[in-house]
Amino acid sequence: MRLADRMSRLGTETAFVVLAKAKELEKKGMEVIHLEIGEPDFDTPRNIIDEAISALNNHWTHYGPSAGLPELRQTIADDISKSRGIKVGPQNVVVTPGGKPVMFFVILALVNEGEEVIYPNPGFPIYESVINFVGAVPKPIMLREEKQFRLDVDELISMVTPKTRLIIINSPQNPTGSVLTKKDLEEIARIAVKNDIYVLADEIYSRIIYKGRHFSIAAEPDMLERTIILDGYSKTYAMTGWRLGYGVMPEELAVQVAKLQTNCNSCTASFTQIAGIKALKDDQSEVVKMVAEFQRRRDVIVEGLNKINGIDCQMPEGAFYVFPNIKKLGLKSSVFADRLLNEAGVAALSGTSFGAYGEGYVRFSYANSVDNINKALAKIKNFVDKL
């Protein structure tokens, strides 16, 4: 089959590939501990499920506006205004089936072929995939361990050219769990304003943070009109399968993103949006409990990894991933991850799944029970000791 040339530029998300391999090994009788997939292992809170069932029973099964139900857009605007310390309205909100459409639609709407997009590396692989797909120029900025995997602002300055159209930031970050400081955001904002660059702020893990509070670049001076906030329900409310995300952006851009939604998805499922209203407005105690449990698991896995000879692991400040350094073991990241799965039954992702600068690292998701994390640590230690 002769495919369009652009398909050769489209990447993938390796977590799903590794998950499929792990499932095949399980079918053959191997016990596999899943530390590869970025998905909370908790159930969606009962109040959200009940609201969705009620919505189905009350006929919320039809098309809705492409930008999202007005009630949900208002609820999101109110929540974002309060949590980020900014003033936005429903006209700034587009509801999408998951967070990825926000990445895709915003890049499609803002970036011409040949224009440049700066994005974190190691970072979520779909950034680079979409940049390449639309014919833009990907410019990865390296996240270094010695800087706690926060981007280097001086390096960012050196990368900006007249063709730079968009900067992507992600905090808390996947795969490293790093969190940008208020000072980092201030400096990035100054660069964006000075050079008339938009910023796509992926804040999907904004509620999963272990000390201090989340800061948004949208709250920095003159940034509201040039920031697109990406957020959603998958991580915070354990709703990955519900496919409910949203972007908050300047109204003029929101109109164009809604037009892309019309052409692609028509709209987001109405009953899930009704449940989304409930999730944001109701008691948040289940979210608090989940984050506390993630912190407990984080402490267990970081301590355990640092006890294994040849592995060094920083303490992440957010999300639910660790990104340990395995360079002393003398194996390429992909080889380590493949062998760990096939020989030890622990599923993880190679650091290079998140870009070339991820070489020498692997990503473990601690969205699993403490018992399973401890079992995985024992398997990892046994595997490493035999190298």
Image: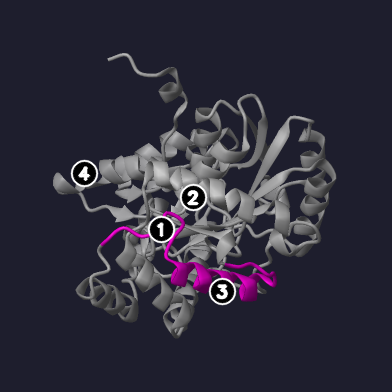
Q: Secondary structure at mark 1?
A: loop
Nearer the observer, 260 or 148: 260
User: Which residue is under mark 1?
Assistant: 65
Q: Secondary structure at mark 4?
A: helix
CB contact under 8 Å: marks 1 and 2: yes
- Provide residue 328's location: percent of width, then percent of height: 57, 41
Give me the disc on residue 169: none
CB contact under 8 Å: marks 4 and 3: no
Quarter that holds the C terminus: top left
Task: Say whether residue 30 is left or right of residue 365.
Answer: left
- Provide residue 266's location: percent of width, then percent of height: 36, 49
Instruction: Tell me if mark 3 has few (under 14), some (14-19) or many (20+) residues whose alpha carbon lies within 10 angstroms of its own.
Output: some
User: Which residue is under mark 4?
Assistant: 25
- Residue type indicated by callout 4: Leu
- Residue type indicated by callout 2: Ala
Give me the disc on residue 258: 2
Give me the disc on residue 79: 3
Q: Between marks 2 and 4, how big is the CA–CA gap?
A: 42 Å
Counting residues from the start of the chain, the first of labels 1 and 3 encountered is 1
Q: Is residue 63 magenta?
A: yes
Q: Between marks 1 and 3, how big is the CA–CA gap?
A: 20 Å
Give the answer, above or below, for where 111 lies relative to 260.
Answer: above
